[in-house]
Amino acid sequence: MDTDRDTLIDLYLRMVRIRTFEEQAGKLQEAGKVPGALHLYVGEEAVASGVMSHLSNEDQITSTHRGHGHLVAKGGDFKKMFAELYGRETGYCRGKGGSMHISDLDLGMLGANGIVGAGPPIAIGAAFSNKYRKTRNVTCCFFGDGASNEGTFHEAANMAALYRLPVVFVCENNGFGEFTRQERHQAIQDIADRASGYGMPGVVVDGMDVMAVYEAAGEAIERARRGEGPTLLECKTYRFFDHVGVRGMGVVYRDDSEVIEWRKRDPLVLFEARLLEMNTASAGELQQLRERVLFEVEEAIAFAEASPFPADSALLEDVYTVTGG
Amino acid sequence: MTSTESSPKRELAYVQAINEGLTQLMRADPDIFLAGEDVALYGGVFGTSRGLLAEFGSDRVVDTPIAESGLLGLGLGAAATGLRPIIEIMFMDFMGVCMDEIVNQVAKMKYMFGGKAVLPLTIQTMSGGGTGMAAQHSQSLEAWFCHVPGLKVVMPSGPYEAKGLLVSAVRDDNPVIVANVKTILAHRAHVPEELYAIPLGKAHIVRPGSNFTIVATGRMVSESLTAADQLAAEGIDVEIVDPRTLQPLDIETIVTSVRKTHRALIAHEAVRFGGIGAEIAAQVQEEVFDYLDAPVGRVGAPFAPVPFSPPLEKLYVPNAGRIVAEVRRMLGR
């Protein structure tokens, strides 16, 4: 492997940022401090990090209900993110979107989304725009194994291949559509198999191995930038936490032993071992980096808690754009 | 309004007015593109986009697969990233296929994102019955969309409105649904040659009158004019108000008329129950109850899907005769 040190550390940092953010968010929810439902990304960090390290702010992504990790990896601001989870005026969406609609258009992050399968049609629109304006920008569409059964995915995949749009469909196959195991929601094992049905390449990659994701995503994204069209990149991963929150009530859909088994392949632990083995960084340096991120997260939580809620007048603002026309 | 009297007598059919509006808009703004099923090579199944492919090319006039969700998402993603798309949904009935994109994505993105998204997206479609196309190609579903915050809805009643409202819809920085009416595509009227805009949210007094207000949308405007001629012979001087835009609704112009006439009837092609007429009636009663000499009346389709058989469809679709009958009933005649 000839990936330079900065890239390796960058990948590690992105993963640590996601893990730390999500673990703290989970604690806040369990403590009853943030309202609503949180869908946490813990266990899947290698996917967002490996893809996002190839993207600039001009490249767009569409996300899912499990979207914090995507925004963090895209460069999201912890303070604005926590403030949004708390429903505060200083949040990314002025407190009106919350966890499921967290977004930053300036970073090309076109929103987490509360509707499973909503991202693919929006992603091809952004990719159409990139092509129309003759840019080299790429749109990465994150979606899960559950969303791969939605008609929207099929419509978007067909159109992306037909128009050779600069889009990469990144399937985060974590083995469950909400609480329904993959084998109970579709008759195939590899969602990437569907790619040939649309006329695009399909690639399966180990979603717990950030370097594997990084390399496969790099190829797909470069292919899109060259104008050669979309790729379906399936990343096999696993959700360490429940569909909603950290651990829900009456967990009957999977055994703890399965989680313990997958945790042995924790993407952060795997990559840390690799960084040490390659002498990319010392254990002390990595520890320092983790502590720095935790400090940033704690600062951001304090910022969110000190932030005001939106004024009553905000209720009717932002329904329409009032300029232009 | 920017209309001048360049050629005051020039008349166009409704379908030509749409076509001219699309053409002139696309000439003026390179960020505008049109996408939909059979809009390019075929020129649109109603002929609204004929000639556009030849002038603007396949990058800007885009035939799509029959995939309404993908199509709407294409428009949304493009609008959110700086383009000004016009997305055509061939029949209004097909909007059911992409309802999530319209209601949960397009309408809400701006609000959910705290105001940051600007979505200059136009969705143009074709509503209305009376063509023997039965229950899935004949509906008037505009009230559905008026109910969803974040959307604007216009319903052009003739050629002049078809072009002018389209121009405003496309230039607006919000998602606007243009519900054209297929049965009046051949209607002809004066349409200025230049690019003019009819402001959104502004009703139009189609016919001034003194003692009865009819608020009519879409095809019911011309039907109401016919009805008004008949009623005039009976001493009923009807004022006809065309809201033009249903969301946002210009209730002020409507209630001003009712203050003068003391009686109001709302006529639309959509099913009467839960139609836009119900909202208008409620607002009229809230605003000018003391001025009313009778309960507000409504003419709309009966509570059934649009039937195929010609005699049944004729019975179903509201027309001038039904409007006249309802006015007489309201006056106890």
Image (tube, coloured by chain):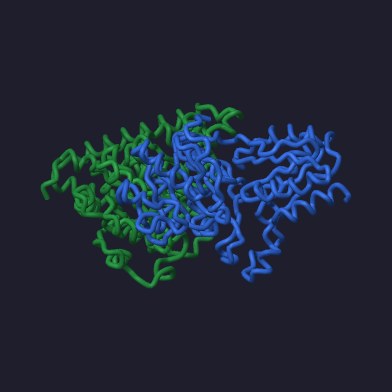
Q: Give the residue drawn at x 38%, y 62%.
A: A154
Q: Is residue A300 left or right of residue B60?
A: right
**Numbered label tally:** 0
The residue at the far right in this view is B332
In the rendered image, the vertical position of residue B46 relative to residue A52, given as above or below: below
Residue A12 visible here: no
Corner quadrant of residue A186: bottom left
Q: Is residue A196 left or right of residue B324?
A: left
In the rendered image, the vertical position of residue A161 relative to residue A319, given as above or below: below
Q: Where does the image place residue B196, in percent across and percent down from the top left?
A: 48, 34
The residue at the far left in this view is A2
Q: Is residue B159 left or right of residue A264?
A: right
Q: Give the residue drawn at x 56%, y 55%.
A: B127
Foreground of the two, B72 or B133: B133
Chain A: give its colour: green
Q: Give the residue drawn at x 75%, y 55%.
A: B322
Corner quadrant of residue B195: top left
Q: Where does the image place residue B189, in percent across and percent down from the top left?
A: 56, 44
Chain B: give its colour: blue
Q: Where does the image place residue A288, in percent across and percent down from the top left?
A: 26, 35
In the rendered image, the vertical position of residue A215 relative to residue A299, given as above or below: below
Foreground of the two, B291 or A156: B291
Q: Where does the image place residue A126, in percent across and percent down from the top left?
A: 35, 46
Corner quadrant of residue B316: bottom right
Foreground of the two, A123 or A10: A123
Residue B292 visible here: yes
Q: Give the residue drawn at x 64%, y 64%.
A: B306
